[in-house]
Image (spheres, rainbow, N blue to C red):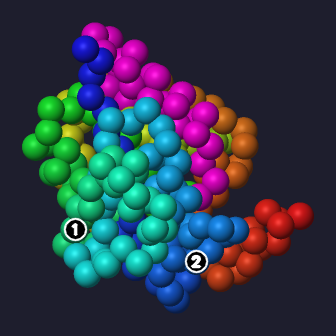
């Protein structure tokens, strides 16, 4: 029986720099958040935890992703204090993951709409291969910088639960030399492009329309 690996999609940010909920902004036929979620749902992850602010009514999620085919594959996790930084969303997702029989979780960002399914699958494959090895994580990397998607084994959850503010998993992996893992270097910037400002949103719309 293959180890259970779930996804934790971080979708609880306040979009302060954007001035409105960036997950609800459209890129083509789907919103930014829906594009990110659909990639996760189309992957071989066993289930997806969508971590949101407590008041999020999921208006940014496309009706397609509420269809029976997709809806059984994801669960909303309402988190407190998401306005204080990414660490609070991550901790909420990990808390929920700990209640399930999972080997680990792949952390994804709700505002990474161009993440390719192939790169995500590379991380998932490495997460399965970590079973029985010394590796505790598998992470994508762009220009030698580890970025989501990042697989984190259950053994790392206690360390990750201590993160504060806007710290992410990278803070733990970077500062603990005893943690071993696999890094998957990828040279396609689109996979890692997150959208924070109106200028970035307008720019990427123009790029993708040409």
90 left or right of 95 in image: right
Say whether residue 43 is magenta.
no
Q: Which residues are magenta?
A: 113-138
Alpha carbon distance from label 1 to label 2: 21 Å
Mark 2 — residue? 25
Local secondary structure at mark 2: loop
Residue 184 x/y as whole percent: 57, 29
In the depicted view, which residue is nearer to us: 146 or 27?
27
Identify the residue at image location x=62%, y=43%.
116
Let me know if residue 32 appears in the view.
Answer: yes
Do the CB atoms of the residues marked 1 and 2 lie less than 8 Å apart? no
Local secondary structure at mark 1: strand
Which one is earlier in the sequence, the residue at label 1 or at label 2?
2
Residue 169 x/y as whole percent: 36, 47
* Quarter where residue 200 is shown: bottom right
Please tell me how crowded label 2 is: few (under 14), some (14-19), or many (20+) other residues with Cα within 10 Å. some
Considering only vertical position in the picture, is 206 above or below 193? below
Quarter that holds the C terminus = bottom right
In the depicted view, which residue is nearer to us: 73 or 202?
73
| Residue lying farthest to the left in this orientation | 99
Mark 1 — residue? 78
């Amino acid at each position: 029986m293959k180890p259970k690996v779930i996804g934790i999609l971080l979708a609880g940010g306040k979009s302060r720099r954007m001035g409105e909920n960036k997950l609800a902004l459209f890129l083509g036929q789907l919103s930014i958040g829906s594009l990110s979620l659909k990639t996760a749902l189309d992957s071989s992850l066993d289930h997806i935890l969508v971590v949101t602010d407590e008041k999020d009514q999921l208006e940014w999620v496309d009706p397609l992703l509420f269809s029976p085919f997709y809806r059984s594959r994801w669960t909303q996790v309402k988190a407190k204090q998401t306005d204080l930084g990414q660490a609070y969303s991550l901790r909420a997702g990990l808390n929920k993951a700990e209640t399930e029989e999972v080997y680990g979780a792949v952390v994804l960002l709700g505002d990474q709409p161009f993440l390719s399914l192939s790169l995500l699958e590379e991380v998932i494959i490495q997460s399965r291969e970590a079973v029985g090895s010394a590796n505790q994580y598998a992470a994508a990397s762009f220009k030698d910088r580890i970025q989501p998607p990042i697989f984190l084994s259950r053994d790392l959850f206690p360390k990750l639960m201590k993160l504060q503010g806007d710290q992410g998993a990278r803070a733990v992996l970077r500062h603990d030399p005893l943690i071993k893992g696999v890094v998957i270097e990828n040279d396609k910037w689109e996979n890692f492009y997150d959208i924070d400002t109106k200028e970035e949103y307008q720019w990427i719309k123009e790029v993708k329309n040409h």
